[in-house]
Image (cartoon, rainbow, N blue to C red):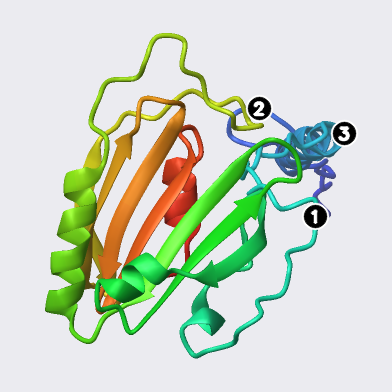
């Protein structure tokens, strides 16, 4: 006797869900996550990047002469080192400094610089045989420098119209990290400043509008 076999249909999972439902749900979830990542990346690309500001330094240019310096009549190893311009001042005259020669200088010059208008700057420069002689002579110049307080109403003739610096000032003159001399800078009380310094065997005395005296001393190459 032949027994009838009842055909079986597709099996169900133990939880009662169709077997094909689980992998389909996983694929849908991955698509949702991928879509979110793509949307985030696109939104980030649409937002312009804000550049980081760079720090900047503003440097003020040193003043320069508006007129040409005159040539020196005498050329020596020493005068070749002396400047023909200093800040806004240009050399206007250079003559032998007989007074310093009489004080045993091997060579000495008295020089005048002008800004082309009303302001002027003078430098006396000399060389001695030894640093000790130069130091001793500079001491006599410092002793003779005016030390009076600024006179009432005294003003600087500087074209920069800058405020007067805090003076007096003293200190060492250095070169390549070594002390080669000393400087003294004072307010003469008449609208000018006076700087006296030594550099080895050389001595210098600079007179300038008081507002310019520190800058002129700092700019002098010796």
Rendered residue at 83%/41% (across/down): 9
Dot 3, how many residues are within 10 Å of its Cα: few (below 14), some (14-19), or many (20+)? few
Q: Position of residue 49 (x, y in %)?
A: 76, 37
Q: Where on the picture, by quarter, is residue 200?
A: bottom left
Q: Quadrant of the N terminus?
A: bottom right
Is disc 1 placed on a helix, strand or loop? loop
Using residue 106 as the reference point, say whether residue 112 is left or right of it: right
Measure how far apart labels 2 and 1 are at the Cα level.
104 Å
Marks 1 and 3: in contact by CB < 8 Å? Answer: no
* Number of numbered tags placed on the structure image: 3
Residue that carries the numbered disc 3 in the rendered image: 46
Residue tagged 1 = 67
Q: Position of residue 55 (x, y in %)?
A: 59, 41
Residue drawn at (80%, 55%) of the image? 67
Residue linked to disc 2: 16
Evaluate whether residue 56 shows in this view.
no
Nearest the eye: 222 or 189? 189
Is 35 placed above or below 2 here?
above
Q: Please, what secondary structure does the residue beneath circle 3 have?
A: helix
């Amino acid at each position: 006797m032949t027994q009838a076999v009842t055909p079986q249909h597709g099996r169900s999972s133990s939880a009662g869900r169709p077997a094909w439902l689980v992998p389909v749900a996983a694929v849908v979830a991955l698509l949702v996550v991928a879509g979110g990542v793509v949307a985030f990346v696109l939104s980030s690309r649409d937002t312009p990047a804000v550049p980081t500001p760079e720090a900047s330094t503003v440097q003020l240019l040193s003043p320069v002469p508006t007129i040409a310096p005159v040539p020196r009549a005498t050329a020596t190893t020493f005068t070749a080192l002396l400047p023909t311009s200093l800040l806004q001042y240009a050399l206007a005259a250079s003559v032998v400094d007989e007074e310093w020669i009489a004080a045993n200088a091997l060579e000495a010059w008295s020089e005048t610089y002008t800004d082309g208008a009303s302001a002027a700057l003078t430098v006396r420069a000399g060389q001695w045989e030894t640093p000790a002689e130069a130091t001793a002579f500079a001491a006599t110049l410092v002793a003779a420098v005016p030390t009076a307080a600024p006179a009432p109403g005294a003003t600087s003739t500087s074209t920069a119209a800058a405020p007067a610096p805090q003076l007096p000032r003293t200190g060492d003159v250095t070169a390549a990290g070594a002390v080669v001399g000393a400087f003294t800078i004072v307010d003469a009380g008449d609208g000018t400043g006076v700087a006296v310094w030594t550099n080895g065997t050389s001595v210098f005395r600079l007179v300038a509008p008081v507002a310019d005296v520190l800058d002129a001393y700092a700019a002098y190459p010796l």
